[in-house]
Amino acid sequence: MTRPTGQNPGHEAPPGLSWGDVIAALIETHGTLTAVAWRLIEHADGDDVASVERALRRLRTRGQHTGGVWGQRVLRVFGVPAAFVERVRWMGLYHSPFNDLPVALCLDQLRLWDRPPIADSRARSWLYLGRASCALRTRRLDDAELHLARARDVLAAPAADDTAARLELALVEGFVASRRGTRDAVATALERARALLSTPTLSPHDRACFAARHADQLAYQLNRDGAHQAALALYEALPAADHHPFASYRRDAGRAFGCFRLGRTAEAHALAQRACDHAGDGGYVRLRAMGLLLLATIEGAAGDASRARARAIALRLGDDELLARVERRERSAPPAGA
């Protein structure tokens, strides 16, 4: 295979974001390297434009090494370009389809991006949140709590654009607390999430997904106490319009479980099938497996096929937490013909 003219074999740029990518994005936004330098001078008295330009030229050759003083200045003034933040944000949000990839692939991607300049910036909070989700999928609560603590440290000083990260942190902390059985900690985390949901900077899609997750975690506590009608009311209070497949899945799966517990089996079955459709429409493989498990519960002795499909998905994804859910449902399933 002939290489394109001018390509130097063995010296291709490494995958992931580099300082050169950051500087290139800033030049595209501001027009010239000189314009970028002038913006920096506005925040650092005593520098002249020529020396700042030289520093920026050196910085863009740093690849994925620490950017030093000038790297920190660039990140402090400009932050990571939005397009790159969106990529790591996608890896840190539980309600993105990133968490429906095989766990090993998720960890590979998180390691790939956990280098400067991302690792030197506030955007690294999303990498910690993504690692926490992977730890939960492999049933390692201690590791999840370690990654959440690191994300919490990054977000300790508030910034205007970190509402989604703070919401993600609160909801995952609430989930971990529920697994630890510390209900006061669950309530504290979910109250933080509730307050953040009113932040106007959230996008409509994020708001819908976070609100559905918040309702789901509140309803989980109610269902554990046998308050199925109150839990169902939380799901029914969510918007009826389908703003996002993830939010629609959470709403209809929650309604299905509530209807099933209240003896409305036909309605529960139809809602569970709708939930599976939402998961499929959004590319949410794990959610589809959970929807299949819900269908199997509603179907009783006739649910073996749905449970088998859910097991196959869990195995393909290398998802220990999902597989444990399948095995719990298999143990509690009524025998065929019952």
Image (cartoon, grey):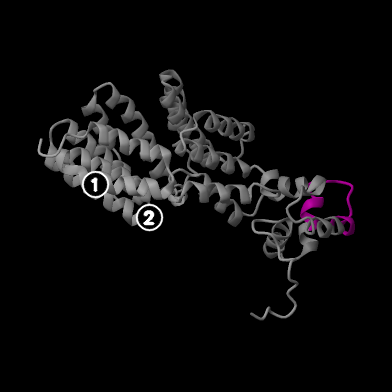
Residue 102 in the image: state x and y as whole percent: 46, 50
Mark positioned earlier in the residue sequence (2 or 1): 2
Q: Is residue 227 left or right of residue 199?
A: left
**Identity of the residue drawn at 22% across and 27% down:** 228
Graded by Cα atoms within 10 Å as few (under 14), some (14 to 19) or many (20 or more), the crowding at tag 2 reads: some
Residue tagged by mark 1? Answer: 306
Please give the range of residues in magenta. Answer: 37-52
Q: Does residue 44 show up magenta in the picture?
A: yes
Which quarter of the image is occupied by the C terminus?
top left
Indicate the secondary structure of the residue bearing disc 2. loop
Residue tagged by mark 2? Answer: 283
**Identity of the residue drawn at 36% across and 35% down:** 324
Indicate the secondary structure of the residue bearing disc 1. helix
Q: CA distance from mark 2 to mark 1?
A: 18 Å
Residue in the foreground of this view, choosing between 299 and 60: 299
Which quarter of the image is occupied by the N terminus?
bottom right
Residue in the foreground of this view, choosing between 303 and 260: 303
Looking at this view, name the residue that lies furthest to the left: 337
Q: Is residue 307 left or right of residue 69?
A: left
Q: Is residue 185 left or right of residue 116?
A: left
Residue 256 in the image: state x and y as whole percent: 22, 39
Type of the residue with mark 1: Ser
Q: Is residue 77 left or right of residue 279?
A: right
- Work out whether residue 248 can be spotted: no
Residue 223 in the image: state x and y as whole percent: 27, 27
